[in-house]
Image (cartoon, rainbow, N blue to C red):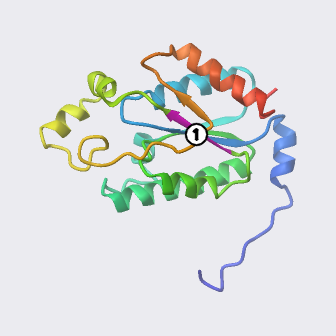
Amino acid sequence: MDQNIVWHNYAVEKSNRTEQKGHKPCVLWFTGFSGSGKSTVANALERALFSQGVHTYLLDGDNVRHGLCKDLGFSDEDRVENIRRVGELSKLMVDAGLIVLTAFISPFQAERDMVRNLVEDGEFIEVFLNTPLDICEQRDPKGLYKKARAGEIKHFTGIDSAYEPPINPEICLNTSEQSLDDSVQQLLQYLKSKNIIG
């Protein structure tokens, strides 16, 4: 790092922002195959939290690639950089006192662990969408599996690029067996049990 770059301390700190908002900040990191339900569950959870007056922000993989990460492709190296950028952004949002929901395939354990290590203990909640690949492929909401099978998309997770399931996620959901409401309720109960929300 450039020696001329010095960290600037703020008069208003995370603890002040947390007290003002009335809940603890954290990152809910939704990971799983394309079509596993990451964005759907994260969106429904954010709606439920917002209705309770909780300060949130949802970062979605596709949306981030329209701006912050639009210069990245889908090679392993670009996927790592994509997650690094999102991790740093999530860290800033946690410092702002928000509950950040992120919906990213994020196929590599090392990158998910990297994000975990950016925030304080208890502020990273790994949510594994453990929906079987065959179910995700049947859903194929964006037609991506069909294109990947036809060779039109390279480096597609689950087809010709690896996915490393979380080793010890805080929450495990299977949207082929659980309703959307059940998934949201499981997440809300977890947040309450950890005193993140009231």
Percent x, y of residue 106:
44, 47
| Mark 1: few/some/many CA within 10 Å (<14, 14-19, 20+) | some
Q: Looking at the rendering, in which quadrant would you find the C terminus?
A: top right
Position of the N terminus, as image quadrant, is: bottom right
Point out the residue furthest to the front here. Answer: 167
Q: Nearer the viewer, residue 58 or 171?
A: 171
Q: In the image, 38: left or right of 20? A: left
**Residue 134 x, y percent position in the rendering:** 29, 26
Above or below, comparing residue 161 to residue 44 in the picture: below
Q: Nearer the viewer, residue 72 or 134?
A: 134
Q: Residue at the spot x=41%, y=29% of the render?
A: 36
Question: Judging from the image, what secondary structure is the residue with disc 1 in?
Answer: loop
**Horizontal side, residue 71 vs residue 48: left or right:** left
Residue type pointed to by label 1: Pro
The answer to whether 105 appears left or right of 185 in the picture is left
Q: Give how far across and how far down residue 41 sits, in percent.
A: 52, 25
Residue at mark 1: 169
Residue 104 among magenta residues: no
Q: In this rendering, would 73 be left or right of 24?
A: left
Q: Residue 62 appears in which quarter of the rendering?
A: top left
Q: How many marks?
A: 1
The percent coordinates of residue 124 (x first, y second) are: 65, 45
Judge whether 100 appears above or below 146 on screen.
below
- Indicate whether 83 appears above or below 53: below
Q: Residue at x 64, y 58 (%)?
A: 118
Q: Which residue sits at x=33%, y=31%? A: 133
Q: Residue at x 71, y 23 (%)?
A: 189
Q: Main secondary structure of the magenta part?
A: strand
Looking at the rendering, the stretch of residues picked out in magenta corresponds to 124-128
Judged from this view, the residue extending furthest toward the left is 150
Q: Quadrant of residue 184?
A: top right
